[in-house]
Image (spheres, rainbow, N blue to C red):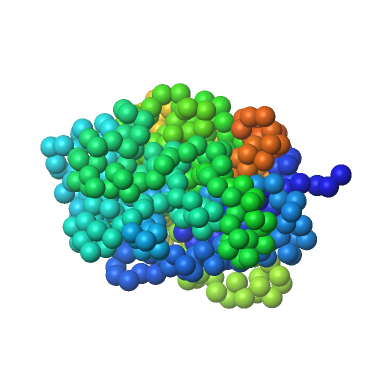
Amino acid sequence: MTTKYVLGIDCGNTAVKAAVFDCKGREIGSRAERVETRFPQPGHSETDMIGLWHKCASVVAAALTELNIPPEDVLAVGVSGHGNGAYLLDNNREPLRAIQSLDSRAEAQVNQDKTSQDYPRLSELNRQGVWPSQTATLLKWLKHNEPATYSNIGVVLFCKDYINFCLTGECHTEYGDLSASGLYDYTSGDVSSDLLSLLGIEEMKDRIPTTLWSENTVGHITRSASEQTRLPVGTPVVGGFFDVIASAVGSGVWDTADASLITGTWSINQVVSDTIPHPDIFMSSVFPGGRYMAMENSATSASNLEWFVSEFFAPEKQVAQSLGKSVFEFCNNAVENVKLAENLPLFHPYLYGSSDLASAGANFFGLAGWHTKSDLLYAVYEGIVFGHLEHFLKLNKAGLHFDNAVLSGGGARSEFWCQLFADVLDIRIAVTPCGETGARGAAMAAAYAGGVYETFQDAVRNMSGEYRYFHPDKTKQPVLKARFERYQAVSTFINSGI
């Protein structure tokens, strides 16, 4: 009997990946290409839409060819992409502008909007208020700063919606991305004129396309897309996911109180809830099954480590490459040999701002003459986990508690980091062996759409695989607690904006 497959595409701020899975959720293999970011002005983070599509088509074709997967054996395709930002088509449905979710151009506008008398009402409706790289905020910024661009907006899409458009020629979005964008009215369960009026972008209502659920079929592979990807014409494509939801689902997160932590460009800390999360939570998103995902997120995670290694570990990177290894394997070995002590330096992972202050900067604190490069490397690892803990505590304060979490993203590939998460957060950490959980979440929806499973939940249950578990080491917690208290004290000063 011929083996059938599902394809998951994961398009983030830094890379686009295509991964092939069998119908049990086993990853056959993946291919990736780096997404190029342009910085036309300070604080502006954009990418080339046509170039992004070409890279996406290239990795799909490469995955099928190099993994020797017959294209006709692919049942369906699912796409996940980074949330927020703005992927805009013009009035002729041609690429207009792609703003990524690391953008901070609207910081001054956000500070002003938060002082408005209408702000409490806005936050009540969209459950997140405003923040710089939020889609709603960027649309308002374009209206006031680039009116010619704004007037030429024909369709407002998110990253994965744009890839779906390129694959199928159809313009749709889905509830996960939309509900996390600031454009979704939680009181009405849709885009509302009341909310858009408060945002000052009423004319965008008919620019937001029809909304589907993640597992719904959005369209089918066109002849043009087939020629570029090798996927057969007519292959179904599902609505897809906001990437952090895709990664949670791909990790097997489904039930209420299930938690997902992701170490990627952003620090993602999220838990499934039966009720609409409190407005004080950074972000909410509609979750499959008519539930919600409460999120505490910021750009304070593994991107800090990538910067540090790029700037200070060039010799080690060359050695690792000559051995056919990753420099991060060297880094993991180096931090394992650092002895935990209260007088190690601290690191605040605010290279791209903090959740409380977009203009906050990263720093090392408590440096002494005897500290080594490995000590600094440990501080970066630990500081990123402390950043996750800051969000973890905000979820707790909002009444969202959990004793276990699934960890995914780059940090999940390091046993040292997995154990550090367990020790710092004082919870059991589960790790799935799948390296591409975002792509697998999208592939799970594709498996359901392809008729492999009767329900989407069945697809998640049967494709999640086994876990490795990491339990807190209680002997380390007194030192880690003391270090976190110092971290918080300095963090408070940084976020005061002084």
Q: Name the one closer to the observer, 110 or 185.
A: 185
User: In the visual, does 281 lie left or right of 290?
Assistant: left
Q: Name the one closer to the observer, 477 or 280.
A: 280
User: In the visual, does 332 lie left or right of 118?
Assistant: right
The answer to whether residue 206 is visible is yes
Vertical position of residue 93 compared to residue 418: above or below: below
Q: Residue at x 69, y 33 (%)?
A: 453
In the picture as drawn, the residue positioned furthest to the left comes out as 117
Vertical position of residue 305 compared to residue 438: above or below: below
Determine the image quadrant of residue 313.
bottom right
Q: Name the one closer to the observer, 272 or 21.
A: 21
The quadrant of the picture occupied by the C terminus is bottom left
Where does the image place residue 113, in percent across and percent down from the top left? 18, 46
Where does the image place residue 311, in percent across and percent down from the top left? 47, 71
The quadrant of the picture occupied by the N terminus is top right
The answer to whether residue 17 is visible is no
Q: Residue at x 41, y 42 (%)?
A: 210
In the picture as drawn, the residue positioned furthest to the right comes out as 1
Vertical position of residue 7 compared to residue 391: above or below: below
Q: Residue at x 50, y 37 (%)?
A: 213
Q: Residue at x 55, y 47 (%)?
A: 219
Where does the image place residue 77, in percent across and percent down from the top left? 62, 49
